[in-house]
Image (cartoon, helix red, strand yellow):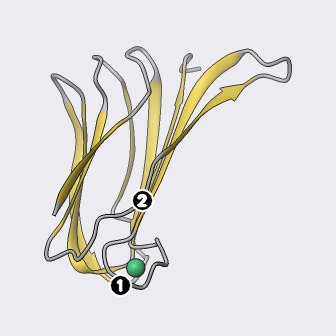
């Protein structure tokens, strides 16, 4: 089963990601935009360690997406959360994206967990 999610992080932002799985099925997670793939990794283990992936990149184009593929999944449930990262006076300086997925029937929503944080300014 395969599902695509739109990520509200514009080009020019500097993003980092951290992805864990705890699934009996083989999980593949890909992050890409209209032109560039930033990561794609697979894992099949019920142990959370090591993480499926972590990394960072400058977002180079529009249309950032996360693609989750789980072999033999019963479900691919879960909805992404997106928020702004703000300064103490409310100015937006970044974006965050979180997605927790259920691929079976036990509804713990810990089978795939994806966190992306991105800042307007790299440093
Ligand atoms: Ca589960």
Which residue is rendered at x = 29% and y = 82% of the image? 45
Question: In which quadrant is the N terminus drawn?
Answer: bottom left
Local packing at callout 2 (Cα closer than 10 Å; few below 14, some 14-19, many 20+) is some
> 46 left or right of 93?
left
Is 7 or 30 nearer to us in this picture? 7
> 30 left or right of 78?
left
Question: In which quadrant is the C terminus drawn?
Answer: top right
Local packing at callout 1 (Cα closer than 10 Å; few below 14, some 14-19, many 20+) is few
Give the labeled residue for mark 1.
Answer: 46
The image's mark for residue 96 is none
Query: What is the x, y in percent for residue 108?
Result: 49, 78
Query: What is the x, y in percent for residue 12?
Result: 41, 14
Query: What is the x, y in percent for residue 19?
Result: 41, 58
Which residue is rendered at x = 56% and y = 16% of the image? 121
Query: What is the x, y in percent for residue 5?
Result: 32, 42
Q: Which quadrant of the figure shows ligand 1?
A: bottom left
Residue 53, placed above or below residue 38: below
Give the labeled residue for mark 2.
Answer: 78
Q: Secondary structure at mark 1?
A: loop
Who comes first in sequence, dot 2 or dot 1?
Answer: 1
Q: Quadrant of residue 23?
A: bottom left
């Amino acid at each position: 089963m395969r599902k695509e999610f739109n990520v509200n992080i514009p080009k020019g932002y500097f993003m980092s990601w951290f992805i864990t799985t705890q699934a009996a099925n083989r999980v593949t997670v890909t992050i890409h935009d209209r032109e560039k793939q930033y990561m794609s990794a697979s894992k099949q283990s019920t142990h959370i360690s090591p993480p499926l992936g972590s990394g960072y990149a400058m977002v180079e184009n529009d249309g950032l997406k996360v693609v989750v593929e789980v072999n033999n999944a019963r479900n691919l449930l879960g909805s992404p959360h997106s928020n702004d990262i703000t300064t103490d006076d409310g100015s937006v300086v970044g974006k965050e994206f979180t997605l927790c997925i259920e691929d079976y029937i036990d509804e713990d929503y810990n089978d795939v967990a994806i966190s992306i944080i991105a800042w307007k300014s790299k440093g």
